[in-house]
Image (cartoon, rainbow, N blue to C red):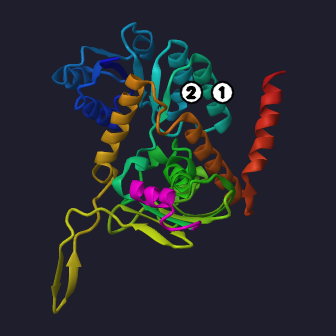
Amino acid sequence: MDKVRIGVIGAGRIGKIHVDNLLKLPQAEILAISDLYADVDLEEWAQVRGIPIVTTDSDAVIHHPDIDAVFICSSTDSHVPLIKSAARNGKHIFCEKPISMDFRQTKEALEEVRRAGVKLQVGFNRRFDHNFRRIREHVESGAIGDVQLIKITSRDPSPPPESYVAVSGGIFMDMMIHDFDMARYLSGSEVEEVFAQGGVLIDPAFAKYDDVDTAIVTLRFANGALGVIDCSRQAAYGYDQRAEAFGSLGAATADNDYANTVALSTAEGVQSDKPLYFFLERYSEAYLLETQQFIECVRSGQPVPVDGEDGRQAERIAAAAKRSLRERRIVKLSELDVAESIHAGNEGR
């Protein structure tokens, strides 16, 4: 396949990021974009970018005979039906995280993808970040020995609006889902146990939706390593994204990215720039790389680097963290397997 012809579903902030990145790739061509709220402004935006079709109907994209792959960038509650429909119509799929708010529904979508024989990549863009990728390389090479500890810091510069909190799925599914995937990625192991603690320390609005804005999650991995993730919806100094893998022979540590690394030292003290402000700046290159790799995998037939099962496993950890916070205890992921079996049995009746 010389060129992958793309349809984009969802033209919000993340959808537009993917569109602009796809336009940088000579191996990709965008034929259509759909959004429930498509209007004249979106039509003009698409026209400037040479996108011929703008519609409110996602089916028009999925059923388009010339489209090879779809980018699903719409609201999370639409992901599963869109994935199933796209798979049935033979389209390869890139889907933003999370696939769904319920890992059991995600499993149903993945079964549809498997039956159709199409590719599904999940938008865990942080795996493509140059810093975190380097940690992973040191783990894989054995440079730090046997992994013993994984530490991840994830703090946003400001909390989202209440309207977003109401539909976000909570801090574990919305925000920490990236960190749960990163924990698996950096450790090279599956998570077996989760213990979560959290509080409403920033904005009382979170409590209205049975959510927290500050959390710490500890993990136990199948390979015996331990993990800890600290997460906050608001860091006064900016976007804080750090990680460390500690092992028997040493450690690999990733600091934040900065606009520059110059430090001014005077008699009054030492001053330097704050970290890059938010994810659009911090992960701009990672977004481009994940898009590029998806296109190359579709063209070459190679497996995608982050598949649907990676998405499902992160959702399982998020579900375990939510249960742990609610029940104030360690939750084994094997408990979720029992619940999944019961759900499957009930669905079959």
Mark 2 or 1, closer to the camera: 1
Q: What element carries label 1?
A: helix
Which residue carries the number 2 mark?
Answer: 80
Relative depth, front residue between 333 and 324: 333
First in residue order: circle 2 vs circle 1: 2
Look at 35% across and 20% down and name the residue there.
6
Q: Is mark 2 on a helix, strand or loop?
A: helix
State the image coordinates of residue 343 (x, y, percent, origin top left): 78, 33
Label 1: how many residues lie within 10 Å, few (<14), some (14-19) or many (20+)? some
Q: Is residue 248 above or below residue 331?
A: below
Relative depth, front residue between 336 and 39: 336
Q: In this view, does 265 lie above or below 113?
A: below
Relative depth, front residue between 245 and 206: 245
Label 2: how many residues lie within 10 Å, few (<14), some (14-19) or many (20+)? many
State the image coordinates of residue 149 (x, y, percent, origin top left): 57, 68
What are the residue bounds of the magenta stretch?
132-148
State the image coordinates of residue 199 (x, y, percent, origin top left): 58, 65
Look at 61% across and 26% down and name the residue there.
109
Real-space Cα separation, disc 2 to disc 1, in angstroms: 8 Å
One can see residue 33 in this view: no
User: Number of callouts in the render?
Assistant: 2
Look at 56% across and 27% down and name the residue there.
80
The tag on residue 108 is 1
The reply to whether callout 2 and callout 1 are in contact (CB within 8 Å) is yes
Q: What amino acid is found at the position of numbered circle 1 in the picture?
A: Glu
The tag on residue 341 is none
